[in-house]
């Protein structure tokens, strides 16, 4: 069942990217956001203190990096250097959960292997 949640999360991410690219709905980002969240909260095969600490610290670092990116993007938008702004909380959360998953799985499988 633990690996099944990872597959559900990955399926929702792929579906969410497709929906986000093709749909003009105001809630098109919901499948992507929920897939990233499901992937982030999914457990490892061996869940121990180290993997829990990596998950928590990854969320912390992702929030710091995501908010920094939001401030930079907002500043560039105000100075009319770029044409988009992260005004929706859902897009900010997508950035944060994407970063948290990248940081978490890179620390679990690449840097700690």
Image: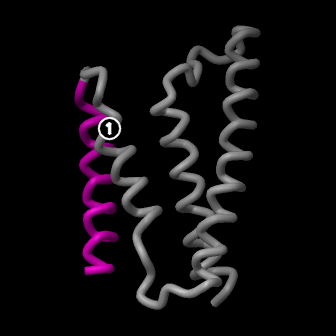
Image quadrant containing the C terminus? bottom right
Exactly how many numbered labels are in the figure? 1
On the picture, is 81 further left or further right than 106?
right
Seen in the picture, residue 78 relative to 110 is either above or below; the reply is: above
Q: Which residue is mark 1?
A: 30
Q: Is residue 57 magenta?
A: no
Seen in the picture, residue 61 relative to 74 is either above or below; the reply is: below
In the rendering, at what x and y percent does residue 81 appear? 71, 15
Residue appearing at x 26%, y 59% in the figure: 11
In the rendering, at what x and y percent does residue 48 appear? 56, 87
Residue range highlighted in magenta: 1-23
Seen in the picture, residue 98 relative to 58 is either above or below; the reply is: above
Q: How is the image coloured?
A: one colour
Name of the residue lying farthest toward the front:
49
Residue appearing at x 69%, y 20% in the figure: 74
Residue appearing at x 58%, y 19% in the figure: 85
């Amino acid at each position: 069942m633990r690996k099944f949640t990872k597959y559900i999360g990955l399926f929702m991410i792929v579906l969410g990217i497709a929906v986000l690219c093709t749909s003009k709905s105001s809630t098109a980002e919901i499948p992507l956001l929920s897939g990233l969240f499901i992937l982030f909260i999914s457990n490892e095969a061996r869940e121990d203190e180290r993997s829990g600490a990596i998950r928590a610290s990854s969320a912390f670092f992702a929030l710091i990096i995501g908010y920094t990116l939001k401030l930079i993007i907002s500043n560039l938008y105000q100075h009319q250097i770029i044409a988009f702004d992260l005004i929706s909380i859902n897009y900010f959360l997508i950035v944060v959960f994407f970063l948290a998953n990248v940081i978490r799985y890179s620390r679990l499988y690449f840097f700690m292997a």
